[in-house]
Amino acid sequence: MDKSVLAMIALVAVPLTLVVYIVLVEWAVRRFSTRTASKLRPMLWILPAVTLLFVFLVYPALSTVWISLLDRGGGFIGAGNYLDFFTRSDTLVALRNNIIWVVLLPLFTVGVGLFIAVLVDRVRYESLVKSVIFLPMAISFVAASVIWSLVYNFDPRIGVLNATVTAAGGEPIPWLINSPWNTVMLIVVGAWMLTGFAMVILSAGLKGISTELLEAARVDGASELQVFRKVIFPLLLPTIAVVATTIVIFGLKTFDVVYTMTGGNFETEVIANRMYAELFRFREPGRASATAVILFIAIIPIMIINIRRFREQEAMR
């Protein structure tokens, strides 16, 4: 059967199944007393969601952990794949690159986003400037990678950077070949994509700072730099922390930019790219699963920090 037909059937069948389930649940619940029905109804209503959560999230996660303990032939090797990850040179390069991503991506993104948010705050064309800066978020990371591949192209007739270098009398530079600077070039692409996100969130935080507080600081003789350093920045710290931790997660999970621009070659590989290579290139599901588990464990603490800070901010409102 044609895939488009199967897709159409799925689009119709899934909602129809849910409607039938709800009708049957309501019909069955009405057969019980009001007290029993009030207890059964919530459980039966959330049952489909819990089932889908188990089938598509819990079971695959547990299966991944189990596969990570097996070798290529399906034999149990315990923590062998994990030890292999932390002892092989190629995975250590991927780990090093991910650390560079985690450090530089939030630094670039939050720094530039905060700078722009402060500059455009309360100016006439604020909305227009924000729209232009946020525009890269409207395209995918793959599309952005294709655009920047042209920017970094070695041929001066194509690459904007090398056209500038040669126009100044220099020689073309292989931006995506020399390690570890090629990783920094890839991080610039990620920062270009995410700066708009950081700017919008930080700008919203700026709007929440009382203008009376800022004016009081200026009346007391504080310069604009002192107002920013002693008033704005401390009040923005919780928002900056949330944005930074969110971007750290992007840095840990990064895959599209590396895969599209270098394919992980020239020592630009990251953990997610390594996981893909282990599974589809080297046919090592155990190693790939171990890499996925390590990546998941690395993300968990950051997610917890983000959730806690979000709850703290909600409690303060």
Image (cartoon, grey):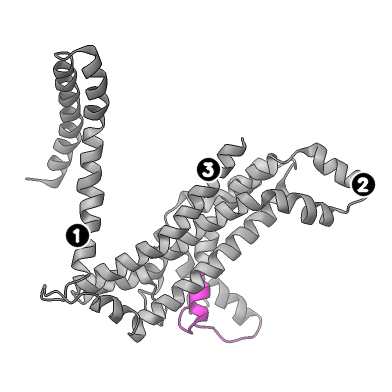
Q: Quadrant of the C terminus?
A: top right
Give the image quarter of residue 96. Answer: bottom left
Residue at 26% over, 50% down? 57
Q: Looking at the image, tell me whether mark 1 or mark 2 is earlier in sequence order.
A: 1
Residue at 17% over, 32% down? 12
200, above or below 261, in the image: above
Q: Which residue is mark 2?
A: 220
Q: Looking at the image, tell me whether mark 3 or mark 1 is earlier in sequence order.
A: 1
Residue 226 coordinates in the image, percent (x, y): 83, 56
For the magenta stretch, what is the residue range?
Answer: 169-187
Q: Could you tell me which secondary element the residue under label 1 belongs to?
A: helix
Whole-Å distance between the Cαs marked 3 and 1? Answer: 32 Å
The kind of residue on which mark 3 rests is: Arg
Whole-Å distance between the Cαs marked 1 and 2? Answer: 62 Å
In this rendering, the label closer to the viewer, 2 or 3:
3
Q: Looking at the image, tell me whether mark 2 or mark 3 is earlier in sequence order.
A: 2
Q: Which residue is mark 3?
A: 311
The kind of residue on which mark 1 rests is: Ser
Q: Could you tell me which secondary element the residue under label 2 belongs to?
A: loop
Residue 283 in view of the camera: yes
Does 12 sit left or right of 247 as displayed?
left
Q: Which residue is mark 1?
A: 63
Secondary structure of the magenta portion, mostly? loop
Residue 167 coordinates in the image, percent (x, y): 63, 79
* Contact between labelled residues 1 and 3, with CB atoms less than 8 Å apart: no
Q: Is residue 186 magenta?
A: yes
Considering depth in this image, is 42 or 14 the residue closer to the camera?
Answer: 42
Q: Could you tell me which secondary element the residue under label 3 belongs to?
A: helix
Considering depth in this image, is 171 or 194 the residue closer to the camera?
Answer: 194
